[in-house]
Image (cartoon, rainbow, N blue to C red):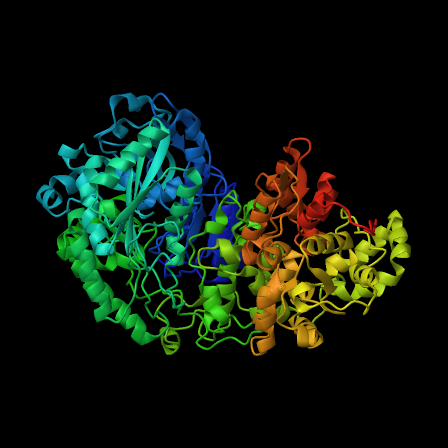
Amino acid sequence: MAAPQNPTERAELAQALRTEVRGEVDLGATARALTTMDASNYRRVPIGVVAPRDADDVAAALAVCRAYGVPVVPRGGGTSIAGQATGTGIVLDLTRHLRRIVELDPAARTAVVQPGVILDELRTAAAPHGLTFGPDPSTHSRCTLGGMIGNNSCGAHSVAWGTTADNTHALTVARYGGDTLRLAGGTAPEALRGLPGLRGALPGALPGALPDALPGLPGLIRTNLALLRTRFPELPRRISGYALDALLPERGTDLVRAFCGSEGTLGVVTEATVRLVEAPAARALAVLGYADEAAAAEAAPGLLPHHPLTVEGMAADLVREPAGLPRGGAWLFVETGGATPAEARAHAERILRAADALDGTVVTDLAGQRALWRIREDAAGTATRMPDGTEAWPGWEDCAVPPARLGPYLRDFRALLAEHGLRGTPYGHFGDGCIHVRIDFDLLSPPGVARFRRFSEELADLVVAHGGSLSGEHGDGQARAELLPRMYGDELVALFAHFKDIWDPDGGMNPGILARPARLDENLRFEVLPKRPVDVEFGYPHDGGDFSAAVRRCVGVAKCRTAEPAGTGVMCPSFRATGEEAHSTRGRARLLHEMLAGTAGGARKAGDTGDADDAGETGFTGDTTAVITDGWRSTEVRDALDLCLSCKGCRTDCPVGVDMATYKAEFLHHHYRRRLRPASHYTMGWLPTWLRLAAPFAPALNALARVRLLAALAKRLAGIAPERGIPVLARETFTRWLNRRWGKGTFIFSNDEVAMVWPDTFTEHLSPEVGRAAVRVLEAAGRHSIPAGRGLCCGLTYVSTGQLGKARKVMRRTLDRLGGTLGAPLVVLEPSCAATLRTDLPELLPDDPRSAELASSVRTLAQYLEEYAPDWQPPRLDRPVTGQTHCHQHAVLGDAAERRLRERAGLTGELSGGCCGLAGNFGFERGHWDVSVACAEETLLPSVRAAEPGTETLADGFSCRTQLEQLGGVRARHLAELLAEGLEEGPGEEREAG
């Protein structure tokens, strides 16, 4: 079954879908490009995306697709690692509307949910009742219940609470064509028969019965009893294939369990009744150190009789910074629960005493536990880069063996890696015998792909030899389904195809997955990328200078799609504001990937039928359809990047370090090269120049800006949002004040007394009071401040608007003007400018050694004081603070020194995460007002409004202070201002209004 490529057929399909479906129907390039990939190695190009509003919409879409012979792929969070969330037909996006918790019954400990409900949303709803949903994959903040059912997901707590199949009681399922079945689990208690999830159930939907709509199923079971009883290995993490043994009479003919893990190949879940479990009131974490991963694996089964909640393992080659971990080359994380903290701790201490570990510790504080679990949860992303930066890929992400065999299996696995010259970093659910690993396959060249196939075949044999399952959590998809005969034998695999045909006789549900699968080495997403490096402006030092490699960093784990920032995290504010995949870091990376695919020379345009010989000449074996074909001129990519705030949050928060702010600047440079730019690029992009020219006329310009008509006209011409206020220009610039203060050229200080202060554009022209406050603080610390030089600029505004040629000229001029002072520590008060000097400057001038020297000299005020005045005691302010850590500070500079300085000054309270939403020029640009306000309203403004009287509002960035003033009417201050206020005024101290 293939997707129609004829434009007329596509138009007819689109019209039919729009007529029958009330939800969104999108067959455009952007929607298709966003869904070509999941979190796997595979790429399949769909013909469109439908976001159904309810179960009736799902059925209507399935009916239309069957009438037109178009395949259907159900998709949740798109975090599948084996390729099962990709397809060539219509993708059903179940996350946009079908995300309601229909009912939560604490007494029965059940919940009725729609398939698009995010796992963490269900857990949050259940938490007030002391309940939770047991299975918890590391993607719990963005994976959906429908996707978990499709893959039979597990997670870290499966040793206590099992898989998704173990926790699913009833399902409502729409089949290809639109008819609906209601399924009840064979092991469901009698009390569940009246649950809302079974309302209106067909007579055959009671536990233990088979629906009349599946007439061939009783015969399949009856004639294959011996095969079903003998060919399925017994182990806790057997996810591969269809769970046909669940249909055995002695197992209750459990059709729900048989459906779980079917990877969208049988039907679409529209509603599910799931079991909730009691969540421990308190938890503790025993962290056990072992000599190596095999020793840790051999120890894991011995801990299971102590009834832990988790037994997770990882080795030193995954943990790049083992701070806080006990001695060892590998560790087990063993979580325990209890009714009280003391009970949970005692449980963990018993395990610590019973474990034969080199070293160990028990962590009870929540912050410490979260920090350790974050290492484990981010592993799906961090494991995609080896310590030397080499790329590593999924494909053998999660095979499982009996826990007692895990130690020997890992030794054999490591030996097989070495035999093939490959490297990987195993980690995972040691208590269940399930191992995750990403391997440095070369998936870019034919020899590398051939080795990938050979290794996969041999590893499948190794897993089977140890009594294991090819998949222990994420399903087979395209990555492993081809190898299922090695695990189950041809006879049982043929039975899988028969089971699929009973459910889906037309073969329209997710073809190529599980039954009659595609080959594991076709449809690889790397095939369509350029074979040579793309000509770009930034150096991309962590990707070998290759823009394609930088874009490949996004593996699709979708941490950027979380509904709330994690703690002090930032990524991805525009997604949280819009809820649209196109405005997530992953979505933008996917569009850039498709843009590169469309310019690679081998991909064919959509609608161009081509022929097999042409495709073969390119060396491609998969779908080479190009979705985006106009390269750097792409309006689809431009529009998606338009709402990127360039906050740089993804640079740190993304587990693989995708840097969308840099990619955006790169794209804008090429997109507008030799073309007319938006007005804001000429106004705010050239802000340093305009402010320098305006400085002598500041009073007059401020007066004119207060005339409403003139201000409105100026904003219209400048491309500024009409809702924005125009910032007030300083009557005296910072450097003029500083030179006047000391008498320019009058004083000479020794080098160990001098602090060079960077006169960034914002401090210089818009908030010189911050610079004056910093000078006072530095003086109190025994350092005399001098401006770093005249006419210096980091190039920030030129970078953020993609004017990279101009940015490079400005940066070179800055390096020239620094001259002999280059390398001396620079105090940079504006976090965005400091981040530009630290990262953008050396990446735009990689061949100029002075750029790295300047980058290494940058310090924030707190960092400078800690390093060069370590004995200075700040004034005791003893008051609470609120506000937000600047996104660039979080992403590039870190705020550890600021935290320590605040603590020493007696400033208590945590600053919020996220982004203020102004983000330099972003929030000022016309068309960005709504998103800018939504970002501010997420965490910053609520935290400020909730602050107690007398709380100081801290914001080191000019953008953050401006946003707070314009949206909240709040005067926020730089940390330097608070410290300066707390100092006793010395003789001749000046106070200026600016």
Q: Position of residue 571 (x, y in %)?
A: 53, 51
Q: For this view, does 692 lie left or right of residue 401?
A: right
Q: Position of residue 322 (x, y in %)?
A: 37, 54
Q: Which picture quadrant has residue 483? A: bottom left
- The residue at 85%/54% (across/down) is 713
Give the answer, above or below, for where 333 lies relative to 439. Answer: above
Q: For this view, does 14 lie left or right of residue 941?
A: left
In this orientation, does residue 928 appear?
Answer: no
Q: Which picture quadrant has residue 301? A: top left
The image shows a total of numbered marks equal to 0
- The residue at 75%/64% (across/down) is 688
Give the answer, above or below, for where 890 lies relative to 686. Answer: above
- The residue at 35%/62% (across/down) is 393
- The residue at 24%/59% (across/down) is 482
Q: Position of residue 165 (x, y in %)?
A: 28, 38
Q: Quadrant of the N terminus?
A: bottom left
